[in-house]
Image (cartoon, helix red, strand yellow):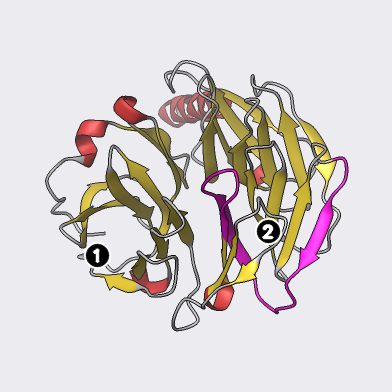
Amino acid sequence: MALAGCNVVANMEAVTTTKKSPIQRSDQFQAVASNGKVLAAVGSDGVIATSSDDAKNWNRQVMPGTSSLIGLTTCPDGSFVALDFYRKVWLSDGTASKWQAKELATKANPLAITCDAKGQYWVVGSRTTLLSSSDKGASWKSQDFGKDAILMSIQFVDADNAIITGEFGMLLTSNDGGKSWKMGKPIPNDFFPHATLFTDMKNGWVSGLAGVILRTTDGGNSWVKLPSKVPAPMYALVRHKGEMLAMGINGLVLKLTNGEWVPIEGRPAPFLRSALSLGDKGLLIAGGAGALQFLPTAATAAAPATSKP
């Protein structure tokens, strides 16, 4: 009986310590961003983790009320904008210490957010809805492209040029800073993009179901499937130190090597959802089960991993 009592006390102390930790195993991180001074990560249940010392230490905040943070971006002034699935955005200055909610004027479910070179917010989501705000979320303009599809990503590659991808292979482009959009040739086979990354308006990658990753070199007019040694879903694409990397299920990190996706790293996480290149410092990766850590640059150049997911 005495031994049983001691075990209970020890376990409760461990639980208490875990609850005080800024990063917890229950955290499901969905996006990361940096303004050059502060790193931030957002996740389910309204969790926001921030670091001002290159991820050596993290501070934890939880947004009040019902909240599920699924996107994060920074603006040219260094401010942060987090996207809440419950039709809100959360705004903070460059310190990411205090956050204010602004409602989204839509019935659609928001799924991705970005901030352009002018500091305008852009949000895409279900019902092919595109929202934009030029007054820091005080008011929103809405555009519906008239399709029964989900828009999954929006990216400005420069001040004028932007790309949206969505369900059923939807591809939209703008060359006037988002004032107008042109429907492009659909990505083949009703492609559903988990992640999209364009380095310019001609060169881009999309990852989809069953580990399929396609590449275009002509702005989406044609796509080539890149072979993979691990045909598993990839939820994030990032360019780091001149290399293309993909992250996804079972904590896998793949590297594009000689035209083929090769596993180079595995992390103890059910999934990796977002990544941010910090140059020579390394790669910040985020995902499920509290995955929020640096992957040293040296690791991304390592020999292919031998373990399977």
With respect to residue 145, does 37 lie above or below?
A: above
- Residue 27 visible in this rendered orientation of the protein: no
The residue stretch that appears in magenta:
138-163
* Residue drawn at point x = 27 percent, y = 41 percent: 242
Is disc 2 surrounded by few (<14), some (14 to 19) or many (20+) residues within 10 Å? many
Task: Determine if residue 129 is in view.
Answer: yes
Q: Indicate which disc residue 118 carries.
A: none
Please name the amino acid that badge 1 sits on. Val
Where is residue 7 shown, x and y percent of the image? 44, 29
* Dot label at residue 124: 2
- Furthest toward the top, the residue is 53
Residue at image mark 1: 230
Rendered image quadrant of residue 215: bottom left
Q: Are marks 2 and 1 in contact (CB under 8 Å)?
A: no
Q: Residues within 10 Å of mark 1 (few under 14, many from 20)?
A: some
Is 286 on the left or on the right of 43, as rendered?
A: left
Asked if residue 271 lies left or right of residue 18, the reply is left
